[in-house]
Amino acid sequence: MIDIPHAEHQIHCVTNFQDLVSTPFSGVINAICWTRKLPGDFSEIVNKVELNGNITAIGQEELCELQLSEQGQLARDILLNDLKLLTAHGASPILNVISYYHRDNTYPFFPTDVYSFHVDRSPIPIDTFLCTYHGESSEILPNSQGKKKVLIPAIRDELKKLYHGEDEGFESFLSENFFDLHYQAEPDARPISLGLGNLWRLAVDHPESQVPPCLHRAPKERSGQNRLLMIC
């Protein structure tokens, strides 16, 4: 089971896929978790996939062709079923083996890569689904424990130095460069690990959303250990 601090009410836990996709976000609830303790050896799948860069997508055909032990087959069956459930729901899940993500060093004072707490944005109603099966798991941050970076005076001043247009275009500049999606954790913040095997649905910033978008980030990978992540 996932360790959720008692004071955090933004997370709602369910016990099946149907409840995961049908339970509405409301009030401060912007993260829904199908808590699971999965059988099988997911590390075997990670170790047998032929890597082609820092992020390797695994197609269903390749997954089915892997020669696996009984425990590896159990893990594969779970992956195939999760892919099937999410696809039937209308999502487009991608299964990745991740060595590391690209680091953004364009502006050292303001990285915009996925290791920074951020929200997802969409022009249409949509949710983010993700599950870590092996390796370090993603984290979310209670909205009350994060502050939008573009509202922090020192950071905002630095961003204004990068911008050379009219004052009325500054907010558009922040949005077009994704600066306004990123958050800084408060000094006493307590990020929540999403755990292994749990399938999550996170609220996205879109025009029809009734709740704040969920703040989340990718973890720093453990040296020598690749992650197995499904996301859509």
Image (tube, rainbow, N blue to C red):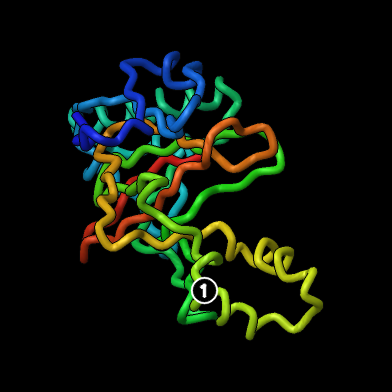
Q: Above or below — where is 49 with respect to 130? A: below
Residue type at numbered disc 1: Pro
The answer to whether 166 appears left or right of 7 in the picture is right
How far across and how far down the image is residue 84, in percent?
48, 23
Question: Tag 1, which secondary structure?
Answer: helix
Q: Quadrant of residue 162?
A: bottom right
How far across and how far down the image is residue 170, in percent?
72, 70
Which residue is drawn at the image coordinates 67% and 61% (left, top)?
Answer: 175
How far across and how far down the image is residue 72, in percent?
23, 34
Query: Circle 1: is it few (<14), some (14-19), or many (20+) Cα within 10 Å?
Result: few
Number of numbered discs on residues: 1
Q: 179 or 14: nearer the eye?
A: 179
Which residue is drawn at the image coordinates 21% and 37% (left, top)?
Answer: 5
How far across and how far down the image is residue 213, in percent?
52, 42
- Provide the residue designation for mark 1: 153
Q: Above or below — where is 81 with respect to 63? A: above
Confirm whether residue 55 shows in the render: no
Q: 159 or 216: nearer the eye?
A: 159
Which residue is drawn at the image coordinates 19% and 29% (left, top)?
Answer: 1
